[in-house]
Image (cartoon, rainbow, N blue to C red):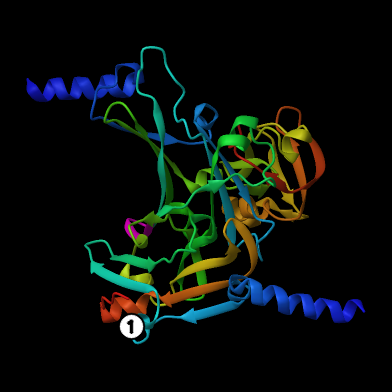
Amino acid sequence: MKSKLILCLAAINLVSPAFRVCGSMVVISVDSTNIQSMPFAVRTDTSGNASFDKSINFYVIADPKGPPYTPGDNMHFSLGGANLSIYDGTNLVSSCSVAGGKVPSFMQDVNAPFMTNGVFYSFEMGTNHLESANFEICYGSGIHPAIDCYRFALRTFVPETSIGLLLGEKGDKIEVAEVLPGTPASRAGLTAGLIVQQINGVDSARYGIKMAQDGFRFGIVDLELVDPSNGKTNKVLLTTAKTFPSAIH
Amino acid sequence: MNLKLIPCLALVLSGLFPALSAHAEMDTFQISPVNVSDSPISVQVTNMDSGEWFTVFYKTNETTTDKFLHANLQVSDGDKKISSVPVEKIWTTNGVEFEFMVSATYLTTSKFTITEEGHIREMGMAGFTNWWFYLRDFADAKQTAKP
């Protein structure tokens, strides 16, 4: 009976911050689908590093006031701190609290209130451990003992270089499974269902799916595509470009 | 005329403001368990289940300010950089403390650096002092040394 009550209270916590009880800690997972509503923004930059393949600069700009105020939620959160934890699979590599500072003027496309009052976290990550590195920002309530933590995997916000095509197999052929919006492939008018006949002048069957997909990440890609609905062959020349997840708000 | 005036002014200014000349230097010191007692730094290493827990204490003086003091943890796997992160400062009564955890597997080439930039009160000046050490040195020695 008691455990049911605790579970029920925990569920209420997760469903509505307005009903959050004292002493609670809520961990919210953040990715490119919900970053827009979070009290922080994430940017990445590879320009200052020796090689895009080796390391990436991460910039996180956090609102010092925390989660948006909800009427009836008299919690008044403020920024507590940020932590970076890096893992190698499931084993910890390192963990530390990250120092924050003023938002530098070189940051662009950041909301004005963030630029003025935001707390700026900046760190560099090698690409070899991005898969299992997490950043966490925590806000504490000054009135009630409650903590809200926002956690995201760094990999979520890493820009990728591609033409924007996801491939699939259809019998012994390779087909376009998905065209990502805002990419060179979508701008060229490619659609899902097209059969990839040749890649850079070579029969696509010789590539295999994985090699073909990897080959789409660098330089210029010459594709010969067949539309199975009418048998028409089409040739396109696409230049790879950085495709960003929707990490900006 | 101007050429003579500049060194003359520099001499007068450095005499009037000793702090100016003191902060315009660029010094880098590598710390190890052998020489740590000669530095303003002490290092404690505690073995935990998931790694080595480091507590680094930097003894401040009356000129140390938050704005010009920084610390950085660089974790590497051989010659590959895993991360480079500014570590949060915890101000105590007579110094600043830094805490972090690193797996024993990644101690060999990982290092921690404390930098105090040159300044006069709130005004930044050229020069800095770096204190740095390899994590492995203190993890091996598990030494505690207070300045």
Q: What is the three-letter code of the residue carrying label 1? A: Pro
Residue lying at 35% horizontally and 67% vertically, measured from the top left: B56
Residue lying at 34% horizontally and 87% vertically, measured from the top left: B34
Which one is nearer the viewer's eye here, B5 or A122?
A: B5
* Residue A22 position (above or below residue B109): above
In reply to whether residue A95 is colored magenta, the answer given is yes
The percent coordinates of residue A223 (x first, y second) are 76, 47
Q: Residues within 10 Å of mark 1 (few under 14, many from 20)?
A: some
Residue lying at 45% horizontally and 35% vertically, measured from the top left: A30
> Which residue is the extreme one toward the left?
A1
The percent coordinates of residue B80 (x first, y second) are 51, 71
The percent coordinates of residue A195 (x first, y second) are 68, 39
Q: Is residue A246 visible?
A: no
Chief SS of the magenta region? strand
Q: Quadrant of the N terminus of chain B?
A: bottom right
* Residue B68 position (above or below residue A237): below
* Residue highlighted by disc 1: B33
Which contiguous range is marked in magenta? A89-96
* Residue B140 position (above or below residue A129): below
Image side of residue A63 versus residue A110, left or right: left
Q: In which quarter of the image is the C terminus of chain B?
A: bottom left
Which one is nearer the viewer's eye here, A219 or A81?
A: A81
* Residue A131 position (above or below residue A185): below
Which one is nearer the viewer's eye here, B92 or A31?
A: B92
Q: Is residue B52 visible?
A: yes
